[in-house]
Amino acid sequence: MTTPLIHPTAIIDPAAGLDSSVSVGPYSVIGPHVRIGAGTTVGPHAVIEGHTTIGRDNRIFQFVSLGAINQDKKYKGEPCELVIGDRNTIREFSTYHIGTVQGGGVTRLGDDNWMMAYTHLAHDCLVGNNTIFANNAQIAGHVVVGDWVILGAYTCVHQFVRIGAHGMTAMGSVLLADQPPFVMSEGHPAGARSMNFEGLRRRGFSPERIAAVKAMHKALYRENLPVAQARERIAALPAEHPGSEADVALMLTFLDGLSAQRGIVR
């Protein structure tokens, strides 16, 4: 496969499926089960292998490794996948692995994510849309990251942890428990410090919606309530804060998925 957009030193398996508008830089290697959508650019020295599907208009920088087999000792060569959406930026030395049969078979990155250098997505991770992973943010297997999450540089996330939408971690955080939506955390291990109010304002949240998020923070963290009682308080908030129904539903759905083993950041 040689086109004006494919450097002659790139090695692309004839069975790979690349849109005619995809560009590939020098010395990159692309395997037979890879599919890449229109407008995506692949820099030099990238390796894309395995059953990997990449959408439109992504920017994949040099020395990235996508679709390699996972680092799970139970993996026996099953045809698991890595699926990447549209308009993502994936910077140097990032490593994203395929899933496992035990975890559903797919590692997934959504749309419009900004993934800085040395980020790592382990097997079976599910990352939403519009997230930012700063340099060296690393998530272990089976982690779920909601939309609009920001992970600070050198954040490490334990396997099976969930991070709710609009959350944020500080640099060097080690997240060992689930982090509910809107929460900001920091520390080793990470603890909840506040809600991501400035991020919500930048995303156009109204003062009324932010007031409801403040009330959720109070119920979860300021009143020393068990999670079940805090949930009851949160469920009643739309009566006091019209327009907060979707935000409250987001929080309730997250809390309903808590495991006794993980709990939430405190």
Image (cartoon, rainbow, N blue to C red):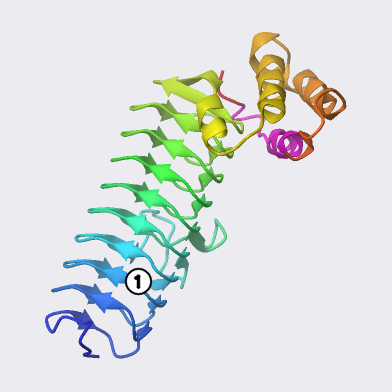
Secondary structure beneath dot 1 equals: loop
Q: Residue at x 56, y 37 (%)?
A: 166
Rendering quarter of residue 208: top right
Residue 57 located within the stretch drawn in magenta: no
Image quarter of the N terminus: bottom left
Question: Observer-nearest residue: 12 or 131?
Answer: 131
Q: Residue at x 56, y 44 (%)?
A: 146
In the figure, 30 relative to 211: above or below? below
Q: Residue at x 62, y 27 (%)?
A: 263
Question: Would residue 227 be found to the left or right of residue 31 on screen?
Answer: right
Q: Position of residue 232 (x, y in %)?
A: 83, 23
Image quarter of the C terminus: top right
Which residue is most to the top?
A: 223
Q: Which residue is mark 1?
A: 40
Q: Position of residue 175 (x, y in %)?
A: 46, 29
In the figure, 145 relative to 88: above or below? above
Instruction: Specify whether residue 144 is in view.
Output: yes
Residue 258 located within the stretch drawn in magenta: yes
Q: Position of residue 19 (x, y in %)?
A: 38, 83
Magenta highlight range? 247-263
